[in-house]
Image (spheres, grey):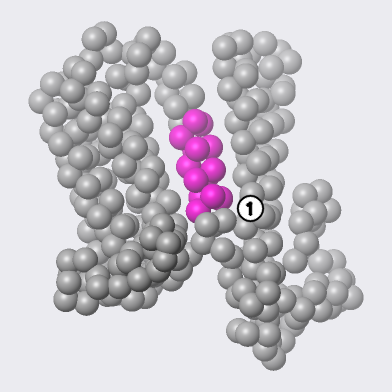
Amino acid sequence: MEWAPIMGALPPMSEAEWQRLFALYQQIPQYELLNKGMGLDGFKHIFLLEYLHRLWGRLIGLAFLLPLLGFIAIGAIPRRFVPRLLLLFVIGGLQGAVGWFMVASGFLADSVAVEPARLVAHLMLALLLYGVLLWTALGVLHPTPLHHPPASVRRWSLATVALICLTIPAGGFVAGLHAGLDYNTFPLMAGHWVPESYAQLTPFWRNALENIAAVQFDHRLLATLTLIVALITAISGLRRGVAPAAMALLACAALLQYALGVVVLLHVVPIPEAVAHQGMAMLLLTAALIALHPQRRP
């Protein structure tokens, strides 16, 4: 209910503080529309989930910043990495601020959840943070790129990363709108390749953000394109001897992720399978970045 980056590291320490926070929760639409009559024990449960997420984010920041300052002080980090590492800390702080901006949208009138667009913004910043961290680490492990990698494989690898970075946010809109609870058949949606209600909102661009049928279809389409391009990339890379282990992992991760997506949809989005689908998306992005990294320009 409140964003206190410093004091918020501690949970409520007294019954009076629990009651104060619960009273704040009772003033927002989510309580009135979804959880009317909830007791303090129920509030403590949903509070714990949010509290642990915020605490974990703060711990990540400390685990990154304190060693970084120490390593900079003793000269243990090459100078070329220092600006990027400091930028990563800034991105991490911005991620926390955007996280609060996302949560605060759940306090708006007649809102019972965060706005999908804000959820996706939070997700995209997480992707950026993870991607730059991984790319930096790979630069430390493998400072020298391949000599004249095949241009075609590099283009396919770039296309794969780009498609993954589009498909994951599209999945964020599916999650934000609970769009996975509808059209639980595959490959058709209500008996059609393109759902009849795809373009029901005006102006047209709103469908990509607010229309359940369009959001789910877009995610399916992007996922299918990602699978195809990832397999082409992997086959091309294996044939030309470019990062064979990463290319093999990329193909396996793409196939497993696509299969997981279908299973989650057909099973009407059970939480454990949905979390596995999210985790597999990050593994797929990891494989794609590892495959692309040795092909970077000197």
Q: In the image, 121: left or right of 182?
A: right
Quadrant assignment, res 196: bottom left
Q: Position of residue 125 (x, y in %)?
A: 54, 43
| Residue at numbered disc 1 | 99
Q: Residue furthest left?
A: 239
Left or right: 98 in relation to 22: left
Residue 196 appears in the figure: yes
Q: Amino acid at mark 1?
A: Gly
Q: Secondary structure at mark 1?
A: helix
Residue 283 visible, this angle: no
- Position of the C terminus by quadrant: top left
Question: Overall secondary structure of the magenta stretch?
Answer: helix
- Residue 284 in magenta? no
Which is nearer the eye, 94 or 70? 94
Q: Crowding at label 1, few (<14), some or many (≥20) Cα neighbours within 10 Å?
A: many
> Is residue 36 depicted above or below 168 in this figure?
below
Q: Residue drawn 24% across and 10% down? A: 148
Q: Residue 1: give x, y in percent of width and height.
A: 75, 66
Image coordinates of residue 49 in percent, x first then y, are 62, 66
Q: Is residue 127 magenta?
A: yes
213 sits to left or right of 230 = right
Q: Residue at x 25, y 45 (%)?
A: 226
Left or right, residue 108 beside residue 199: right
In this rendering, the count of numbered labels is 1
Q: Quadrant of residue 160?
A: top left
Q: Above or below — where is 60 with respect to 197?
A: above
Residue shown at 65%/32% (left/top)?
89
Q: Position of residue 90 (x, y in %)?
A: 66, 33
Query: Residue shown at 64%/49% (left/top)?
Result: 98
Q: In the displayed orientation, state which residue is furthest to the bottom.
A: 37
Please identify the quarter of the rendering in which residue 139 is found. Answer: top left
Q: Which residues are magenta?
A: 120-133
